[in-house]
Image (spheres, grey):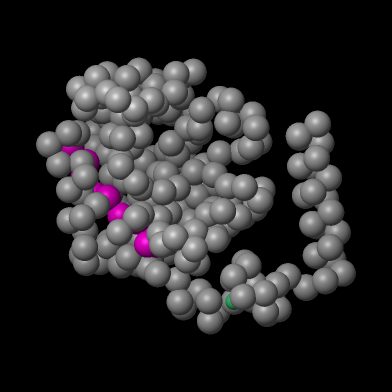
Amino acid sequence: MKIIGKLVADGFRDLLNLFYPNPCLLCRNTLQSQEQLVCTACRLELPETGQHRGEALVSGQLRFAGKVPVDFVYAYLYFNKKGKTQRLIHALKYRTMKEVGSVLGRWYGYQLKTDIRLNDQVDLIVGVPLHPAKLRQRGYNQSDWFAQGLSETLEIPWSDRALVRNLYTISQTGKDRIERWHNVNNVFGIGDPDLVANKRILLVDDVLTTGATLEACTATLLAANSQSVGIVTLAATR
Ligand SMILES: [Zn+2]
């Protein structure tokens, strides 16, 4: 029923778009034909971190210090409660607007390519897999849509088969760090060893908070002989 409801909602939105021009997702002003999702004024106001240009790069990396070796950690946008980023992520995750992921991925991919030539440092883009139950419920993995957008402008292949997520859930309550680590460490596995062995992986997620999930994915990839792992997220808390 949920899936049918979603299809109807998607179809209805497409139909609406035929008759009514798209409003900006953030300010509701009508979009011009060359604008996507958000108007130019709102786009200029997005709280970009600029981390890939060297500002505040450390704060992202510190969360991984001494745990697993990560080449770099870049987040596209800062996440503020009730701010623009939160609204975009909400649309991406809970309003079936997958295109938010791909559009933002293309925008950030373009910056990563022109500013620091990240495309020369990565062989494969891999999204953090969703828990199978959540994937069934949502119908898509929002991180994969962000990965696809990045892949388009960076011109690097992406895969949703490289990493898999097992049925365990990450429980963080009342456990010490070591116990949590073992718990988290069983969550991910490798879907196709040939895809990741000796490759420089760009690991992609929607929001960077504690980093526990990204840590577990990185450890899994390195254990499968990936050459290196760098991380890009759509957003990060300050
Ligand atoms: Zn706007």
Residue 197 visible in rendering: no
Residue 56 is a magenta residue:
no
What range of the chain is rendered magenta?
Answer: 69-78
Describe residue 17's horizontal placement relative to residue 178 as left or right: right
User: Considering only vertical position in the picture, is 183 above or below 25?
Assistant: above
User: Considering only vertical position in the picture, is 81 above or below 186?
Assistant: below
User: Considering only vertical position in the picture, is 184 above or below 97?
Assistant: above
Describe residue 30's horizontal placement relative to residue 39 as left or right: right
Q: Nearer the viewer, residue 107 or 74?
A: 74
Residue sitting at 56 percent across and 25 percent down?
132
Residue sitting at 21 percent across and 58 percent down?
57
Q: Position of residue 78 (x, y in %)?
A: 37, 62
**The C terminus: image quadrant:** bottom left
Quarter of the rendered structure image containing ligand 1: bottom right
Q: Which image quadrant is residue 108 in?
A: bottom left
Q: Residue most toward the front?
A: 174
Q: Position of residue 235 (x, y in %)?
A: 40, 55
Residue 20 visible in rendering: yes
User: Considering only vertical position in the picture, is 46 above or below 172?
Assistant: below
Q: Which image quadrant is residue 128 in?
A: top left
Q: Nearer the viewer, residue 86 or 122?
A: 86
Q: Nearer the viewer, residue 177 or 107?
A: 177
Q: Predominant secondary structure in magenta?
A: strand
Q: Which image quadrant is residue 217 in?
A: top left
Describe residue 140's horizontal placement relative to residue 206 as left or right: right
Residue sitting at 49 percent across and 59 percent down?
86
**The N terminus: image quadrant:** top right
Q: Position of residue 137 (x, y in %)?
A: 65, 32
Residue 73 is a magenta residue:
yes
Describe residue 81's horizontal placement relative to residue 214 as left or right: right
Q: Position of residue 223 (x, y in %)?
A: 25, 22
